[in-house]
Structures are given as structure tokens and as C-alpha cells.
Amino acid sequence: MKKQNEKSVDKEVKLVKIIGSYVSDHFGELWDKSLNDLIEEAVLGVVESVSENNDFDPKEIEAVYIANMASGIFNNQLHLNAIVSELLEHFPPSIRVEGACASGSLAMIAAQDSLNSGRYKTVMVLGVEKMTDFNSNEATKVLSSASDYSFEYGSTFPALYALLAKAHMHKYGTTREHLSAVSVKNHRHALSNSKAHFKKSFTLKQVSESSMVADPLRLLDCSPVSDGASAVILSTKNSGKLLDANKAGGDNKASSGEIDYKNKPKIIGFGHAQDYLSLAKRKSLTSLSATVKATRNAFKQANINLQACNSLRSTAGTRAEFTAKDIEVAEVHDCFTIAEILAIEDLGFFKKGTGAQATLDGKTTFGGDVVINPSGGLKACGHPVGATGVKQIAYLAELLEKGIKIEGDKLEKIKNFKYALAHNVGGSGATVVVHILEK
Amino acid sequence: MKKQNEKSVDKEVKLVKIIGSYVSDHFGELWDKSLNDLIEEAVLGVVESVSENNDFDPKEIEAVYIANMASGIFNNQLHLNAIVSELLEHFPPSIRVEGACASGSLAMIAAQDSLNSGRYKTVMVLGVEKMTDFNSNEATKVLSSASDYSFEYGSTFPALYALLAKAHMHKYGTTREHLSAVSVKNHRHALSNSKAHFKKSFTLKQVSESSMVADPLRLLDCSPVSDGASAVILSTKNSGKLLDANKAGGDNKASSGEIDYKNKPKIIGFGHAQDYLSLAKRKSLTSLSATVKATRNAFKQANINLQACNSLRSTAGTRAEFTAKDIEVAEVHDCFTIAEILAIEDLGFFKKGTGAQATLDGKTTFGGDVVINPSGGLKACGHPVGATGVKQIAYLAELLEKGIKIEGDKLEKIKNFKYALAHNVGGSGATVVVHILEK
């Protein structure tokens, strides 16, 4: 790999830190909370997550990016940027971003652009969806507005993903049991996540015999209609601290009360790609090309950033290329069980056609090759659509900071991770965003 | 004013150019066009606007920002970023932005951040709204989702702006005739705009006697429910051409076939501010504080940019502060006649309380102090809400490039402008964005 000179490094290592994170307590059918309640809870929660141990003035939040899919329909309320701005006494400028179920990660991108342009140093990203005040059949209809109305009118998302499942089964021999294995694992993971919508384990048989929704997808293959919000605070402040500290003689330790930016999780890469909205126009039904493309771009950026950082770190020098093999944990977009199988293949964790068996073999849980959806994923943690992309980042940031308790031989132990990936999909794969995080 | 050193100048003068612009032909009740048709027309139109005289490959468009308020309700279609992306064969990443009637200018900001972060060099911003397939009473209800559902449920926008009008009349003696003068002027301006929804002139008496909507606002005080789309292509490419050319000996002329970036309209400043969503919480009903704040920020940025540019221009050196007095033409958010009066005061064109009389006195038309809404504004050019903020920029960019034909003494002549301002409001003033353009 080519050597980076100091000037290019200086430009490249302007990494965005995740200095605060919050997931609403909890995702679920929250009939006692309104849309505005959920937004307020997330604003207060994420500010508290930074300020509890640090000197942090909420006025440092210079802008808010709010992600939501369909509050105009679910809650008769658009213009959510105004709703969130007035919760902070300095009324920061705010922008709402929508890209169906990928709204959250698209808001993350817009927020990072605002930081990387130099316009802001600290911003909030908040995702929210309040879905259950609506009749659930109607919710399915509302969600179908994320598909191609002119080509696919009448198709609900279970029906569209059922087509993808059928194609995968036909081409790779994926079975009913394989699909069930995704659901069983994600429900088991959710047992250790206090924020999860469902905290109940199921057997393969229970999933395989749950009621049919759209053949081959059954009830326990489908993520639920959930209410919830999530938020992160992103900052480029002291982003050069590691570098500056090296120059100043290695004093990297932050003073008491000061935010230790250096040790906050960092976003080292992201990718964003699109495909046809309608399945009818796609080249393949067994791979989401936008996932493949977004992943390539995210790793490309991560490699540039890691090289740039390493060339100034005394420890490193150059390193081998950073790939999916380096990722130890990922939150992927399992709106349906088949979606997780497609994702872990398209993300490069497993070869195409082998993701289903890998899941059944336990390779996607603790002790396996890569932990997929430790939160329980959309399936079991829940899927308040506008919140999901932000929740993935919030959950992973906390996981990188604090590790996760897992059951060992009689004793609980903490499992720590260095690199994590978030994968967020809009529609049936027309919009895909991949983020890569470093501890 | 303090002298800029070369290094800071190099950083500051990274101006975004508007290299292409399109407004759908025309705004109106376009029953033969679907939402998708309008989007496609704007994509093709704006690409054509750049490529007709220049070498321009649409693949240079690295991303698309699409503004829309309520297609999820009006057209059963969310996820518009996917719709627009697939119209370009390279499927550029795309993000939808919503902020009620300020959606268009918020998308402009997100797009500029992506350019200024260095991630992209050329992007498209497209605004669209297809409203008239919906019952018009229902459209008013849909639009009310831009107000505070929890505080103002039941209030339509004519009712909210009627409150603002009453307050202005009470405090400053603004009259029925003053309001009518706004409408008369904007309808007259629209006569020379081929894209306008309404091309019909009215007398003061006709406006004052049109049917009552919400006292004191009458039918001809209100902008219409329109269909339409608009788009611009923004670029930072060759943004340093002016500077580079100076270094290279002053050869500023672009070769035939090449885009003459240097002579394209530039965005020299923008501001974005928020206020309470509900009128009930506001400090004042006779001024939109978000307009005042956004304007201050926009001029602040424009001053920095102009200083930075001037310090490298052989012609200039330093200059006096750039203010509203330097603006010769503006598109302002006249969703109701009272909104234009509030705007021209809050923007600093006229002292608070004098905007109404200034309008009646002809100070806001050709030959006056500042030409307000030469396109006809929202009132007469039309108000497809998601398109409006982008249309303001597209219209002004073309105006700065080509000037406007006005009637002189028997002969038509071209009026040229150097500085223009666009003012876009969401809701009743909770979100305001101000852009300042230079020829």
C-alpha cells in the first residue's frame, strides 16, 4: 500500500465520533406514548448519555437530523424537524430525512456531511416512528408506500420478500429450517437486550409452524410493527486529539469531567448505494446489488481512514487490507428472516448461497464467525422504521464502548469488540447504507 | 475588516455554483402528469439545461437530493430517493429531505454540505409535489400536518396566517388594500413567467372582494394548490478557476464546449433557523424570528465569502459590509399576502411596519427598491410545496444568468441583477432558510 504523506493524513483522519447514544426504553407497542413523547425521550436520553459523566452543554448540539418514514400518515404530523428543534432551548437548525426503512442511516450520512464540511462540530441524529396508534393492516399498507407504487401496487412487503425467499430457496436450496434459524437466534439474542420489543425465545419448530403470512414467510419470519426512537450525538471535536497528543508527548488521558473523545467509538467508513425500486426491474433476486455496492464503498473508505491513522500511530505503520473478515459484530437489516441471509452474504461475511447453513450452524452468534444482530435485530428488538438505522448505530456504539455480557461456563463474562458494521435497507433493497465503526 | 490571509481565503472561497436549472413546464393543475412524470421531466430538463451548450455527462451527477413534503399521502409513494436515482443509469446515491414548505431549501443545504465536505463535486437537487389528484379540501388538511398537531389541530394554514395578518394590522395599521397590493403585483409579475400557474392580472378591488377564506385572508391572498417540479445542478468543480486563472495569467475564458463554471451563479451564503412550531408559543406574531436569524446567518456567510474572494480579486481589496441593501431581487415565501409583508420586513428590505405601504407604493417591483417575487411568487407562479424552495433557486439562477425582459418606454429591455436572495418558509415560520446568490 502506498505511503500516505502527512498532508493527506491530516485530511483523511477527520473521523466522526459517537459521543452519546440512546435507544428508547423500550421498543414495542407503546400506547401510553405519543410521537412527541418518543422524540422528547430520545433527546433527553441522548443528552443525558453524554452529560452524566462529562461536562456537556446541550447548546453544543449545533444541528439535529431527524429520521422518520411516515409520521405524516401515522400521526398527522410532518415537519418533525421543527418538533425536535424546539426541545432544545437554543433551537438548533434541523432537517428531516426520509428513505423508507433506511431513513435513519441516511440521516446519519447527512449529519456526517454537515460535520465534514466544517459547518458544525457536534450534531444530533434522531430516528423515530410511532406506528401502533394505527390499525396494523393499515400500517402494512402505509409501509408499502416504500415500494414502487406504479409497478408493485398491491404488494405488501411480506409478499415482496417472499419472492426473494422463494428465489433463494430455488437457487441455493435454502429451507424452511434455515429461515427459522435466523428468527430463533435473533429472539435468543434479544433476551439480553432490555430495549427489545420481544423478549421470548422460540424453537425452530415454533417458527416453522407459526401462521403463514406470505409463503414461505410466516409470522415469526417477520419483524413487528413497533414504536420507538433512538438517537446519537456525533462530533468531530478533538478529532485530532490522538495526533495532537502524540505531538504533545503522548498525554492521551482526558481530564476528569472532560469528554474523552479519543476513546469514543468512531465511524471509519460508510457507503450508500441504490438499485431499482421495483423487484421486476432487478438483475438478481438472490442478491441485493445495493448492499454489495454500499459495502464496497464503506470498506474502501475504512481502508483509507485506517491507513491514514495507522501511518501516524507509533504502533502500526501500514497494515493488510481491512475487509469483512475483520468485522466481529454487525447489526443487519433483518426485516424478514430471508433479508438477514441475503445481507450476511452480500456483506461478504459468507459466500453467496452459504449464509443460510452458516446461520443454522451457529456461525452468526456468540462463539461463531461474526455475531449478527446481538440486539435481536429488527425481528426481535423491533422495527420502528425511522428509528432503526439510528438504533443500529446507537446500539453498536454502546456495545463497542461497554462490551456485552455473555454466559460462559457458569460465570458471566464480558465480550469486547473492536470493529462493528451496521447495514440498513430501504424498501426491498433500493436504498442501502453500510456504516463501519471502530472502538 | 480584518485582512484574510491566503490560507484562510483558500478555505473560504469554495463556492457552490449553480450550473443547471429547470422549472417544470408549467406549475399548475397538471392532471395528465403523475408524480413520477414530474420527477422525470425535471431530471431530463435540468440535465438538458447543462448539456445543451456544454460537454456534460449525466454521470458527473454523484448524488441527488430530493425535496418533497407529502407524497406519502398525496400519491401513496414514499422513498422518492429511489424513484429519482433509477432515472439516471448510474444510480447515484439519493436522499429525500422534508421540512414542510421549506423542504426544497433544506435539500439545498444537505446537498451543499455533501459538496463542501469534499465527498462529491457535482450533485442534483430536485423538488417535487403532485397535489391535485387529491380533493382540495383534503389537500388543506394534508398541509396542516406542517403545523403543530398537538397544539393547533383543526387550524388550517389560512387560519394561522390570518392570525398573523390580524396582528400586523392591529400593530402597524396594515390594511386590506396593502394585502391586495402584494397579490396584484405578484400576479402582474407572473405574466412574464411562462412557467407560472396563473397568468392573469387582478385589480386591488378584485383581490379585496374575492371570496373570504379566513378573515382577513381572501381567495386571492392565498397561494394555490399546484403540481410541479424543479431542479438545479450544483457543483464545486473548478471552483478555484477564478483564482487559478489569475495565477495562470488571467485567461478566464472557457473553451467552447466546456462549462464556464466561473460565470455560473454562485451561492455566497445561506442561513437556516428554527422557531416554535405553534404560534401559541411564539414571542411575536408580527415578525418571524427564524427569518431574522436565518437572514443574519446568510449575510454573515456572504460577507466572509465576498471578503475572501475580493482579497484575491485584483479589482477589489476590501469592501464595505454586504447587507440587504445590496440585494436587488428576491424570491420570498408569499404563501399568503401577509407572509410577503412579514418577509420583506424581517429580511431587512424595509423597516418593521413599513413593508405593506412600501408594496402599495411600488417599491417592491421593477423600478422600485428591490424586486420581490419576479416569478410571481408562490401566489401566482404556484406552490407545489416540495418544489418551491428549489424553484426559487432555479428561477433566480436563470435570472442572474440571462436577466429579465421588462417593458421600457415602448421598447423591451433587459434588466440584469448581480445579487439575489431566496427565502423559504416551513409551516408558519418554524423553519426558515435564506440563500444569497451572486451572478
Image (tube, coloured by chain):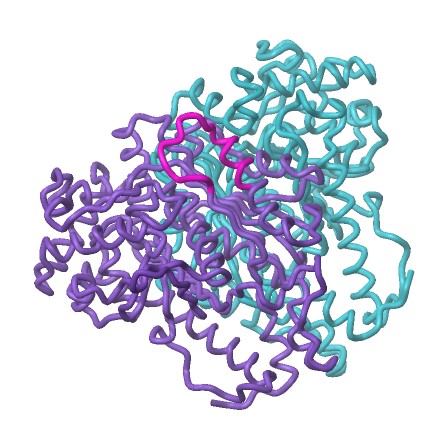
Chain colours: A purple, B cyan
Q: Relative to residue A356, is residue B82 drawn left or right?
A: right
Where B389 sits versus A175, above or below?
above
Which residues, given as a range, are shown in magenta? A24-42
Residue B24 visible in the picture: no
Q: Residue B271 location, x and y as percent?
A: 70, 47
Tell me what residue is drawn at x 35 percent, y 39 percent: B77
Of residue B197 and residue B11, the one placed in the foreground of this image is: B11
Where B182 sits versus B66, above or below?
above
Screen quadrant of the N terminus of chain B: bottom right
Tell me what residue is drawn at x 84 percent, y 25 percent: B354
Residue A434 occupies quadrant: bottom left
Screen quadrant of the C terminus of chain B: bottom right
Residue B70 visible in the picture: yes
Residue A215 occupies quadrant: top left
Of residue A54 and residue A39, the one placed in the foreground of this image is: A54
Q: Is residue B247 magenta?
A: no
Tell me what residue is drawn at x 21 percent, y 40 percent: A155
Q: Residue B225 location, x and y as percent?
A: 49, 27
